[in-house]
């Protein structure tokens, strides 16, 4: 593979979180820059691409900037990757071995500045694999230490903190607990009587009805809310029913966890029928993702300092019922013809309205369906009694109205014209600001380069600290300039188009009206979502809110603030 002049050198930097310890990302990058200049005399600042991930672990390669760098490598745009240390790239031997093979395939050199070896020599490649082995060993040792800490915590049966479960509050207890050589405050859970009664009621109703839906309906009809004053959902009810913290540590509890393979950190006599269960290492937590419940053989179970609310026998029975319901639950097909799911809201209560299909057909041979308010359905008409609109007619009416927006005289086209005129008048000012900022950024980089060269010639002198302080100040200024440039470029890129492009957009809108009727169901759904933000039906009238509308004339509560995802036709 031959190198081309337009290929770039990459610097990759990572830090799992900002702690103030170790080398900052900025320092890592600057050391890598110096290394590139030493190894590649012809490399200019514009030839260096910087990829930095902060707040991501080196345990895997699922990091956004790292993946962006790999795309550039696969496009043959990068001949060399420089990192401050090998473990910045990966702490996992398997991941690194695959990366090394991919680097070799694309003739990409990899250099670790701190470890002082690279992939251009056989000894460097061998040493790199050895270091990666030790990096993974360190990670596994850390994981083992964490599990040891879990055992220490299990001995204390204490509450670790975080959001307290409904029915309890966190209270500091006398004394402390020592974990990993550090003394920490100890907490336990104390019962909140009113909330505890709601928890007992939820378990009782589910045992009585064997239905999350019926339990949910009962709570809605009786205006029983969460500790935050919101309505319970089937998801929140299930979370309560599955939480072992409510389970009384009795003989049934012991037999259940013992038979499930959980690691029980207590003797059987300690399951006294009074205190509750504390389960550690119960969930896998990942940033940006919902917590995943681990298999029970990964749990560390202990007897807590708090009192249990539900007997072991009842808690185990609830888990069996949930498991049976999950295995035999019926899922309705998603191939219905309704177009407005996720867009249509009830004007009376603000809830989503979902399609409800019947087995009847109309004169056109279409299956008849209506839209039903979810709050009305869940509360069995007690909290909302809005009429169910004819879904076939409502869909048809909305589609006809959307097709009209392509007309030159439509309000939608007029708004587009107005926005385009405003952007065109502002574009010259944006362009002037961008050019000024880019010039300032270039001058800033030159100042930093000059100071770095001076610092290299005068190490460990009285002036070193002063020069370093200047470099740091210039670097902070550079980041602010870069952010402003990104903002302006994003504004012009996302919101500005030429007159020719705008004319093409209007032509597409015209063809949209002509081709809409020939689209398939999924294509129509996608097309509607391109223009409509939401639709509100107040019982008699239907308000269609397009993207860009002010919505000032519509007064209703947006349920998306509390429930961002509507239940579809296949929901329970």
Image: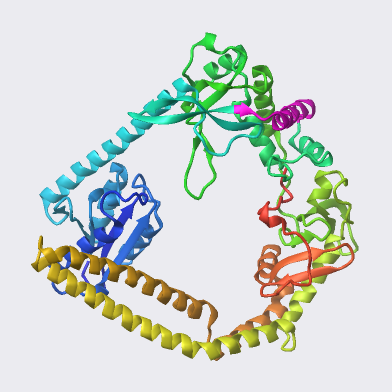
Please tell me which residue is depicted at 54% across the width and 17% down the height of the picture.
259
- Tell whether 425 sits left or right of 391: left
- Tell me the quarter of the image containing the C terminus: top right
- Membership of 205 in magenta stretch: yes
The answer to which of 153 and 239 lies nearer the viewer is 153
Count of number-bearing discs: 0
Q: Relative to 8, say whether 501 is above or below.
A: below
Using the rendered view, name the quadrant where residue 150 is placed. Answer: top left
Residue farthest along the top direction in this orientation = 269
- Membership of 293 in magenta stretch: no
Residue 262 position in % (x across, y down): 50, 22
Q: Relative to 97, say whether 165 is above or below.
A: above
Q: Relative to 165, say whether 471 is above or below.
A: below
- The chief SS type of the magenta part is helix
The answer to which of 314 and 155 lies nearer the viewer is 155
The answer to which of 417 and 188 lies nearer the viewer is 188
Please tell me which residue is depicted at 9% across the width and 66% down the height of the picture.
458
Q: How is the image coloured?
A: rainbow
Please tell me which residue is depicted at 60% across the width and 12% down the height of the picture.
251
Residue 563 position in % (x across, y down): 68, 51
Q: Which residues are magenta?
A: 190-210
Residue 137 visible in the picture: yes
- Tell whether 568 sits left or right of 272: right
Please tell me which residue is depicted at 79% across the width and 29% down the height of the picture.
209
- Tell whether 399 sits left or right of 52: right
- Tell me the quarter of the image containing the N terminus: bottom left
- Tell whether 367 sits left or right of 269: right
Q: Relative to 11, say whether 426 is above or below.
A: below
Residue 544 position in % (x across, y down): 77, 70
Using the rendered view, name the quadrant where residue 354 is placed. Answer: bottom right
Residue 77 visible in the picture: no
């Amino acid at each position: 593979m031959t190198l081309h002049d337009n290929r770039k050198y990459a610097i990759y930097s990572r830090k799992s979180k900002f702690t103030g310890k170790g080398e900052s990302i900025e320092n890592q990058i600057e050391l890598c820059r110096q290394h590139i200049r030493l190894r590649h005399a012809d490399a200019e600042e514009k030839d260096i691409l910087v990829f930095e991930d902060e707040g991501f672990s080196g345990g895997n390669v699922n990091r956004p900037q790292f993946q962006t760098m790999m795309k550039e490598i696969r496009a043959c745009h990068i001949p060399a990757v420089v990192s401050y240390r090998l473990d910045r790239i990966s702490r996992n031997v398997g991941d690194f071995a695959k990366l090394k093979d991919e680097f070799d395939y694309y003739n990409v050199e990899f250099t670790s500045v701190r470890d002082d070896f690279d992939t251009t020599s056989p000894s460097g490649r061998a040493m790199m694999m050895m270091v990666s082995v030790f990096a993974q060993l360190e990670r596994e040792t850390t994981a083992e230490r964490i599990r040891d800490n879990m055992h220490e915590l299990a001995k204390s049966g204490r509450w670790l903190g975080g959001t307290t479960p409904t029915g309890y509050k966190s209270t500091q207890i006398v004394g402390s607990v020592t974990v990993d050589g550090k003394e920490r405050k100890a907490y336990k859970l104390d019962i909140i009587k009113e909330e505890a009664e709601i928890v007992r009621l939820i378990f009782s109703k589910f045992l009585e009805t064997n239905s999350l839906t019926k339990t949910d309906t009962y709570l809605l009809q009786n205006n029983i809310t969460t500790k935050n004053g919101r309505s319970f959902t089937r998801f929140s009810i299930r979370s309560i029913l599955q939480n072992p913290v409510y389970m009384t540590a009795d003989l049934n509890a012991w037999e259940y966890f013992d038979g499930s393979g959980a690691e029980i950190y207590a003797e059987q006599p300690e399951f006294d029928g009074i205190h509750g269960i504390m389960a550690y290492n119960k969930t896998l937590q990942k940033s940006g993702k919902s917590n995943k419940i681990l298999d029970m053989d990964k749990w560390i179970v202990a007897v807590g300092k708090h009192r249990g609310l539900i007997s072991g026998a009842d808690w185990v029975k609830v888990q069996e019922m949930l498991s049976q319901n999950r295995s035999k639950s019926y899922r309705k097909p998603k191939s219905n013809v309704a177009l407005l799911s996720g867009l249509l809201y009830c004007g009376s209560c603000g809830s989503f309205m979902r399609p409800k299909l019947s087995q009847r057909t109309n004169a056109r041979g279409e299956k008849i369906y209506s839209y039903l308010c979810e709050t009305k359905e869940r509360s069995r008409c007690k909290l909302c009694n809005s009429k169910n609109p004819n879904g076939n007619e409502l869909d048809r009416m909305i589609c006809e109205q959307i097709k009209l927006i392509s007309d030159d005289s439509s309000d939608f086209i007029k708004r587009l014209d107005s926005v385009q005129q405003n952007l065109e008048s502002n574009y010259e000012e944006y362009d002037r600001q961008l050019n000024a900022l880019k010039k300032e950024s270039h001058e800033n980089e030159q100042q930093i380069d000059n100071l770095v060269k001076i610092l290299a010639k005068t190490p460990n002198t009285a002036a070193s600290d002063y020069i370093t302080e200047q470099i740091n100040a210039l670097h902070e200024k550079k980041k602010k300039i870069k952010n402003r440039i990104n903002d302006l470029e994003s504004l012009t890129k996302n919101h500005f188009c030429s007159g020719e492009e705008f004319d093409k957009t209007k032509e597409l809108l015209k063809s949209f009206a002509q081709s809409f009727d020939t689209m398939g169901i999924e294509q129509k759904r996608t097309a509607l979502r391109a223009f409509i933000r939401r639709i509100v039906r107040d019982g008699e009238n239907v308000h269609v809110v397009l993207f860009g509308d002010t919505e000032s004339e519509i007064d209703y509560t947006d349920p998306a603030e509390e429930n961002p995802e509507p239940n579809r036709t296949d929901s329970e």
